[in-house]
């Protein structure tokens, strides 16, 4: 588990991280997103013990990163964006070397386990420098897993890979996330949406959104609610207008049933809002035959919260 509480980091007069708090629990993949300068890299360096915070507390599995660094290092697996490898070594030779450096007990079985986990069995005797970039990235990840860490911090693990290699790494990350705490940093929003259980979006050193991927539409103001009902459209419009909740209601279909699109510019379409809409329509004597929250992909939320279109920088 990763716990970040009121984290602050100054670089001179510049406040790179400004009171950030979030959690990543066991069995979760959490993506850390944000444009350039949002604080992602700084937070990851603090989590991995490469930089000290100015203020705040960071814990891994209950141990403070600053005070219990030895314990934390035993529990942490960190894959940097540009992991260094010894290209002249063979795969299993390199893993044996890394296992020895880490003091891994029963190295043979552990090496076999990471070879299988990272789908490297068929290339175990290959020279690393002769492998494709996708396989080299798997070797790097296998080395990270040798000491069986409970917390994984993966910084841009698919950068520079082709689409098939990216899919393979995504599958591997999802598999690792079933038993470990995984903090995953990427600039590809579709990738974060594909592998993550929740996302933390940073903007100017602060948390702009911390939500499960499935709840992005409810947590932001950019999703909308579509309802299909039987009855007169003007009756429904009057009932929703009476809610005085700042709703924007658009009629998008008339037959065979009335369909309305409802937005709330401030607050989004959360559970309470859906319940209020249901009650108002039912009180007006109308029957709801369908209701669905639409829109608000991760890319939509990112653009809305940060003002940056497309990929996270």
Image: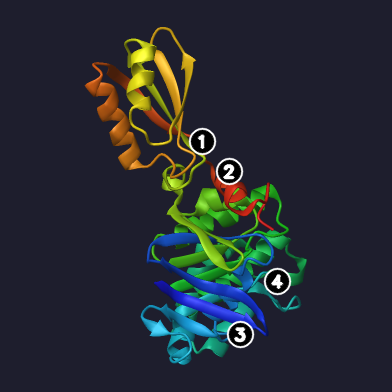
Dot 1 corresponds to which residue? Answer: 295
Residue 16 visible at all = yes
Q: CA distance from mark 4 to mark 2?
A: 29 Å
Quadrant of residue 169 in the image? Answer: bottom right
Q: CA distance from mark 4 to mark 1?
A: 35 Å
Q: Quadrant of the C terminus?
A: bottom right
* In the rendered image, the vertical position of residue 210 relative to residue 296, given as above or below: below
Q: Which one is earlier in the sequence, the residue at label 1 or at label 3?
A: 3
| Along the viewing direction, whichever of 275 and 34 lies nearer the viewer | 275
Quadrant of residue 127 in the image? Answer: bottom right
Q: Residues within 10 Å of mark 3 (few under 14, many from 20)?
A: some
Q: Residues within 10 Å of mark 4 (few under 14, many from 20)?
A: few
- The structure residue drawn at horizontal position 49% and vertical position 38%, both measured from the top left corner, is 223
Dot 3 corresponds to which residue? Answer: 97
Nearer mark to the viewer, of 4 and 1? 1
| Along the viewing direction, whichever of 118 and 33 lies nearer the viewer | 33
Q: Is residue 227 left or right of residue 40?
A: left
Q: CA distance from mark 1 to mark 3?
A: 49 Å
Q: Which one is earlier in the sequence, the residue at label 4 or at label 1?
A: 4
Whether tag 2 and tag 1 are in contact, CB under 8 A, the answer is yes
Mark 2, secondary structure of its residue: helix
- The structure residue drawn at horizontal position 54% and vertical position 66%, both measured from the top left corner, is 206
Q: CA distance from mark 4 to mark 3?
A: 19 Å
Residue 127 visible at all = no
Report the disc number at residue 300.
Answer: 2
Quadrant of residue 179 in the image? Answer: bottom left
Whole-percent x and y of residue 225? 42, 31
Q: Which one is earlier in the sequence, the residue at label 3 or at label 2?
A: 3
Q: Which one is earlier in the sequence, the residue at label 4 or at label 2?
A: 4
Dot 4 corresponds to which residue? Answer: 82
Nearer mark to the viewer, of 4 and 3? 4
């Amino acid at each position: 588990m990763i716990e970040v509480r009121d984290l602050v980091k100054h670089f001179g007069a510049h406040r790179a991280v400004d009171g950030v708090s979030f959690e990543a629990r066991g069995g979760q993949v959490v993506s850390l997103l944000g444009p350039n300068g949002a604080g992602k890299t700084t937070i990851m360096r603090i989590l991995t013990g490469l930089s000290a915070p100015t203020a705040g507390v960071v814990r891994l599995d209950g141990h403070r990163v600053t005070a219990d660094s030895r314990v934390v290092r035993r529990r942490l697996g960190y894959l940097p964006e540009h992991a260094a490898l010894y290209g002249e070594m063979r795969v299993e030779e390199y893993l044996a070397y890394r296992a020895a450096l880490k003091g891994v007990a029963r190295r043979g079985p552990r090496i076999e386990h990471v070879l299988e986990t990272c789908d490297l069995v068929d290339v175990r005797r290959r020279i690393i420098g002769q492998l494709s970039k996708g396989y080299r990235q798997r070797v790097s990840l296998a080395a990270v897993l040798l000491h069986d860490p409970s917390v994984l911090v993966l910084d841009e693990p698919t950068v520079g890979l082709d689409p098939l290699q990216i899919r393979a790494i995504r599958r591997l990350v999802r598999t690792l996330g079933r038993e470990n705490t995984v903090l995953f940093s990427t600039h590809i929003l579709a990738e974060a949406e594909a592998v993550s259980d929740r996302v933390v979006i940073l903007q100017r050193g602060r948390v702009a959104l911390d939500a499960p991927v499935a709840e992005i539409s409810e947590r932001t103001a950019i999703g909308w609610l579509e309802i299909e009902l039987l009855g007169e459209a003007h009756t429904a419009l009057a009932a929703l207008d009476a809610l005085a909740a700042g709703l924007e209601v658009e009629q998008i279909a008339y037959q065979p049933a009335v369909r309305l699109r409802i937005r709330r510019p401030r607050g989004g379409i959360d559970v309470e809002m859906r319940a209020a809409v249901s009650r108002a329509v039912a009180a007006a004597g109308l029957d709801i035959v369908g209701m669905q929250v639409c829109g608000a992909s991760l890319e939509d939320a990112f653009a809305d919260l940060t003002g940056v279109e497309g990929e996270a920088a």
